[in-house]
Image (tube, rainbow, N blue to C red):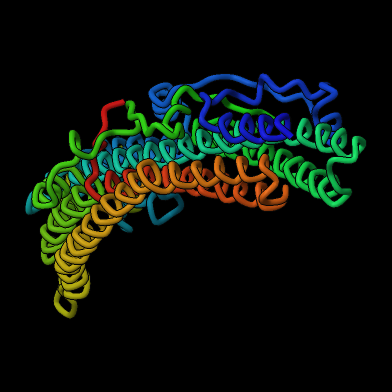
Amino acid sequence: MKKIINIILILILSLTSPSYSWANINTTDNTTSDTDTNLKPIKLRRLILSTCFKKADKFNKEILLASTNLSIAKANMIIAKAIPNPMFNLLYGWGPAWEYVVAGNNQQFGWTEEIQVLGRRTKKMNVARANYLQIAFQVEATRFKVHNQVRRAYIELAASHAYANSIKIQVINSQKLLAITQKRFDAGKASGLEVEQAKLTSRQIAILKDQSIGRLITASANLAQLLGETPSCDEIIDVDEKAIFNLTGEFNSIDPSIKKTLPSLNQLLPAAWKYRNDLKTLIQQAYTDKRNLILANTQRLPDPFVGFNYMFTSYKPYQPQYFLPGVKVPQQPGYLFSYGQELPLFYQYQGQIEQAKNTWLQDFKQNDLLKSQIALDIVLAYEALISIKKNMDKYQVELLPASFKVAQLSRRSYELGKIDLITALIAQQQYMQLVFAYFDTIVQYHNAWANLEQAIGIPLVNN
């Protein structure tokens, strides 16, 4: 009887021990589940959150894609400041119409140039520069979004390790409990129902173990994808910040103390106006569209085309029917100046100007909408963070200690013969459910931090 009590006590107490990686699991151990022998070899490496941020900055495909827009915008600046190339013109004819002086046709060649008026070239350059700065804000907004996703994925991976470690300990101890129950049955001190119940519990935990390994591989693949990698094998990434799931509720670089780091709600909204890159992008878009409106107004006066041509003749040198015999036909050179310009008599580009104006005015409404959404996101994330932190405190101070005490009392009662094994296992199961619920609460807590950081636009914790 005392051996059973000790096994159950070890099972429960082991959940509060420091976590460790699935890399230490010996799948060939005789005490493990039969399903473990079918597992594929798993690659393992260790990453810290700051390293993940650096790798994402360098290799994340979404950031790299957004960064290419900067090169495109820079090329647009070169296009905008370019002076239009001149157009070369050549008119050259042959036949009697160009050979005889009586026809009077000339050959000519020259150049035609478009003259940009009303400072159109400068205004195009202003639009291109404004657009370049807008894209720069978009790149930074993408970078911050990816960092936020990396933080969430990293926490999910740490949670997966915590689940896996707890379930691993349950697997080992449930099989030991099954062996002891079988010995008690052989000695006539336990019923066959207790043996079957112990077997069923062992099988259920073995299933959870396989599921936990799958969760680890999935979380690792999601993190690897955010780091710019293409998952190609069953890999488990180990993390250093698994201690955040200890029942002691310790804080570290990614698990900050609200009392020390969380500003007041009144301070967060001005910070969002200052740091939200997507808001900066929208403000810069309004500035860009204003430059576009100024450029559109210049269309009221179209660009003229100025040309200069040189003219010469290619007559037959001697034309006795028109000149005295022996008199050479003289060359008749000349110069031609041309000027062409669209006359906006019927249409003065009112449509393009009105479109640019309304697009600019629409930006202000989008700005107001985004500010309203930011304020809502900050309030919701802030209140969720406070609420979840209170729940964490309840788990640490009230629920988990009380549940552990109930589990202890149930073991003592089982030892004295006042309750059966099933009742003691139910108390143990309740404690385990609270432990897993506590893990879920920690994940929610970090997601709430990520939501608040996303709403403000800056990290609240230095990594």
Camera-nearest residue between 68 and 355: 68
What x and y, as percent, mark residue 180?
81, 32
Examine the image and state in which quarter residue 345 appears. bottom left
Instruction: Point out the image quarter for the N terminus.
Output: top right
**Relative to the observer, which residue lies in front, 297 or 211?**
211
The structure residue drawn at horizontal position 38% and vertical position 41%, both measured from the top left corner, is 396
**Foreground pick, 61 / 275:** 275
User: Which quadrant would the C terminus be assigned to in this image?
Assistant: top left
Residue 107 lies left or right of residue 359; in this view the side is right
- Residue at the farthest bottom position: 346
Q: Please name the residue shown 16% across and 75% down the image.
A: 350
Residue 160, placed above or below residue 268: above
- Give coordinates of residue 400: x percent, y percent: 45, 44
Q: From this view, report whether residue 222 is shown above or below residue 422.
A: above
Residue sitting at x 35%, y 48%? 394
Point out residue 226 in the picture as x, y percentages from the top left corner. Answer: 50, 36
